[in-house]
């Protein structure tokens, strides 16, 4: 065995030395998992320490103090050790059990294992004094748990939860003393056709209060805000969500319903907004994976800060004293179809220097076909379309008297024409007896909404209308691969299968193993065309078209359009993050108490919705997903991990106090009945209920572990 170990080490050490990046990743991940194990163990330790100290205070003998369970485990003839380590100190055995799913303090006369309850009850009985009748109740060992008054036992049982809450406050306070990173709730982009789009939310709006929040919070985290909306929506999907925000026009208030339409799995309510970034080139990679080569060759480096685009200086956000990416998007979109001159600030040594570069337009990726636009499906409030009397069901049929032949390029066509001259739009009414509405738009700076990867919808932002992109071919580009392959107007696209080459295959990720994208209500034609802008040019695909009930397979390569440019240029931006820091000890503890209270509320609310069936049971996370989530938090730094452990402590406190036999709440339930009746609950019934509680907990544990595996693997 020693020889095998020596061979393995001699094989690995040169490899690690030859590849420092591998060693760095390995050590980094090991350190993250070590922090996670330490943190989770600490939360359990603190809980059991509460029981232990309270028991000692009331003179109860503690025979064992364990983090983890020291149960015997056998795999065939192999018997695993019950502990990872143990030692005896005084009358107590301290140890770490082999199963890391909790912990326990074994007190004299108390055992949560129903099989040992009868023997434990007999063990603590002592003989009666001389002269006492044989029928008198037997005396109990004065140092046993059952011998203590009810109030003392209640304190001992409650002490674990109390310690968890105290430790949660301290952990959160320490985290805020270090500084907890958060993503500000500034809107970077609005998803086309979403509730936010319909209600006029714009990039740059700063959301300060939402949903059931009691007061505004300018240090609210974007992810926490999204979770608040999601949980509010689970509780009542039809509830109107109140929102307070700030923008250049001042503070304002809105109230509208969210929707599940744009969430990844269709189960959570969302508003339809995306957070903003800094106006700074990403510290990771400056350009998107499949950025146009002409753009990727531009002299932009990580850390470059955008100062002006197209001769227009970018205005800094007054709340963060920095230029944010929505300003960059605004100017790039305004000039999407032409080269644009950009001024950036770059750090060179100890000095800052300005560099001017010209960024060419980004050709739109296409299959050489266009798709039929539907009638108007939604109209934004206070929009030009609303003021003009346009209604859902009407249809945009012509631009400058030319019929609309492609719904996908329609927003680009209108924007490009309106950037330089008036544009006449003809809208056909749903009621054919009414005359078409003709609108003349004055020149404006082009701008676009974000197309969602799920349930994608098209919009004409300046006009304020939304429509679907139907999978029916409405245009075939002459001399294109699609035209040569025989694709015809009227064909309906059902699926698109990507066939990447070996290099592309390493980078392109799809939900299906065979890389087939099926057009349906979730993955729409608009979603597919938007996704195509992030795929490489000359990517082989097989398109499945239906014509006269027959499916035709057509080989088509993605290609760059010679007529249209895309709205984004593939430049990656640095995320906007800030630190919420407590500057004084009282403020740190104030933040700690608030954080703990909010986390407790989240847990209680989730459990209430789970019991009432408003939360799908597959959202329950077990030990595997808890460890996975904790590892992700550990990567972001110690303060983020401490905040996660605060949530875990609150979770442990609430769950442990549920009135389930074998949990602390079950013990409190028995003690409350004893206090009310003046005598202990019938021993037989205690054992029966405890057995039922243990079985229920084991079933629940098996379910959440299986659920973890399913969710993580599939």
Image (tube, rainbow, N blue to C red):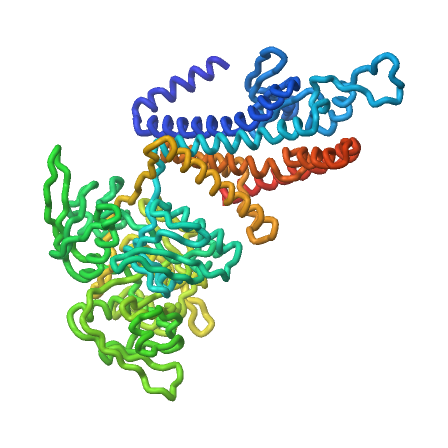
Instruction: Choose between 86 and 24: the one closer to the eye.
Output: 86
Residue 300 shows in this picture: yes
Which residue occupies 70% across, 33% down?
Answer: 671
Q: Quadrant of residue 30?
A: top left
Q: What residue lies at 37% left-to-right and 56% top-to-bottom? A: 244
Residue 582 point in image, percent of width and height: 34, 35
Q: Position of residue 547 (x, y in %)?
A: 42, 72
Left or right: residue 524 versus residue 351 is right
Q: Residue at x 35, y 57 (%)?
A: 541
| Whether residue 521 is situated above or below residue 691 in the rendered picture | below
| 618 lies left or right of 276 | right
Q: Position of residue 155 (x, y in %)?
A: 62, 29
Q: Residue furthest bottom?
A: 433
Is residue 203 at least partly visible in the picture? Answer: no
Q: In the image shown, does 580 or 275 lie closer to the viewer?
A: 580
- Snapshot quadrant of residue 369: bottom left
Image coordinates of residue 450 in percent, x first then y, are: 32, 59
Instruction: Relative to 342, say whether 633 is above or below.
Output: above
Return the residue nearer the eye: 7 or 147.
147
Total of numbered circles in the picture?
Answer: 0
């Amino acid at each position: 065995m020693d020889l095998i170990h020596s061979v393995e080490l001699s094989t690995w050490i040169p490899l690690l030395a030859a590849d420092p990046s591998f060693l760095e990743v390995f050590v980094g991940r090991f350190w993250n998992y070590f922090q996670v194990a330490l943190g989770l163990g600490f939360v359990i330790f603190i809980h059991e320490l509460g029981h232990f100290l309270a028991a000692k205070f009331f003179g109860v003998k503690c025979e064992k103090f364990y983090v983890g369970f020291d149960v015997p485990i056998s795999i065939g003839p192999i018997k695993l050790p019950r502990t990872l380590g143990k030692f005896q100190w005084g009358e107590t055995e301290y140890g770490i059990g082999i199963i890391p799913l909790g912990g326990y303090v074994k007190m004299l006369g108390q055992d949560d294992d129903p099989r040992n309850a009868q023997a434990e009850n007999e063990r603590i009985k002592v003989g009666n004094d001389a002269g006492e009748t044989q029928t008198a109740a037997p005396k109990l060992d004065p140092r046993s748990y059952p011998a203590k008054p009810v109030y003392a036992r209640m304190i001992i049982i409650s002490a674990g939860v109390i310690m968890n809450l105290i430790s949660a406050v301290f952990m959160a306070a320490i985290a805020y003393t270090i500084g907890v990173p958060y993503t500000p709730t500034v809107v970077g982009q609005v998803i086309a056709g979403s509730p936010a789009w319909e209600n006029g939310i714009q990039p740059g709006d700063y959301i300060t209060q939402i949903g059931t929040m009691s007061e505004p919070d300018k240090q609210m985290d974007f992810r926490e805000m999204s979770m608040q909306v999601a949980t509010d929506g689970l509780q009542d999907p039809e509830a109107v969500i109140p929102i307070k925000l700030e923008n250049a026009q001042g503070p304002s208030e809105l109230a509208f319903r969210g929707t599940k339409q744009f969430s990844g799995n269709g189960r959570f309510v969302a508003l339809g907004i995306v957070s903003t970034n800094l106006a700074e080139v990403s510290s990771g990679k400056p350009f998107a994976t499949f950025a146009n080569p002409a753009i990727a060759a531009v002299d932009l480096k990580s850390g470059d800060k955008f100062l002006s685009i197209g001769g227009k200086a970018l205005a800094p956000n007054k709340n963060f004293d920095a230029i944010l990416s929505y300003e960059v998007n605004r100017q790039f979109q305004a000039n999407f179809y032409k080269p644009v001159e950009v001024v950036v600030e770059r750090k060179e040594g100890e000095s800052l220097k300005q560099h001017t570069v010209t960024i060419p337009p980004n050709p739109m990726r296409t299959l050489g076909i266009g798709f039929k636009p539907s009638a108007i499906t939604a109209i934004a409030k206070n929009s030009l379309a609303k003021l003009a009397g346009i209604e859902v069901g009407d249809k945009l049929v012509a631009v400058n008297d030319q019929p609309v032949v492609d719904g996908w390029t329609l927003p680009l066509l209108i924007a490009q024409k309106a950037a330089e001259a008036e544009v006449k739009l003809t809208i056909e009414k749903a009621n054919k007896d009414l005359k078409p509405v003709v609108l003349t738009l004055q020149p404006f700076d082009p701008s676009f909404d974000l197309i969602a990867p799920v349930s994608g919808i098209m919009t004409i932002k300046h006009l304020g209308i939304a429509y679907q992109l139907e999978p029916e071919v409405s245009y075939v580009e002459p001399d294109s691969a699609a035209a040569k392959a025989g694709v015809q107007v009227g064909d309906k696209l059902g699926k698109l299968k990507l066939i990447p080459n070996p290099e592309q295959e390493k980078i392109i990720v799809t939900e299906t193993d065979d890389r087939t994208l099926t057009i349906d209500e979730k993955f729409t034609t608009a979603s597919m065309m938007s996704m195509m802008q992030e795929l490489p040019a000359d990517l082989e695909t097989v398109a499945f078209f239906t014509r006269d009930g027959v499916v035709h397979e057509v080989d088509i390569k993605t290609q760059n359009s010679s007529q249209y440019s895309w709205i984004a240029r593939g430049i990656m931006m640095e995320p906007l993050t800030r630190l919420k820091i407590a500057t004084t000890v009282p403020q740190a503890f104030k933040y700690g108490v608030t954080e703990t209270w909010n986390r407790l509320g989240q847990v209680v609310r989730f459990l209430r919705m789970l019991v009432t069936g408003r939360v799908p049971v597959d959202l329950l996370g077990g030990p595997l997903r808890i460890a996975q989530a904790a590892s992700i938090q550990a990567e972001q730094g110690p303060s983020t991990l401490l905040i996660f452990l605060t949530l875990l402590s609150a979770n442990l406190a609430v769950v442990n106090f549920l009135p389930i036999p074998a949990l602390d709440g079950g013990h409190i339930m028995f003690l409350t009945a004893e206090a009310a009746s003046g005598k202990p609950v019938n021993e037989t019934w205690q054992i029966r209920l405890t057995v039922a509680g243990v079985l229920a907990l084991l079933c629940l544990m098996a379910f959440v572990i299986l659920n973890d595996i399913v969710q993580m693997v599939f």
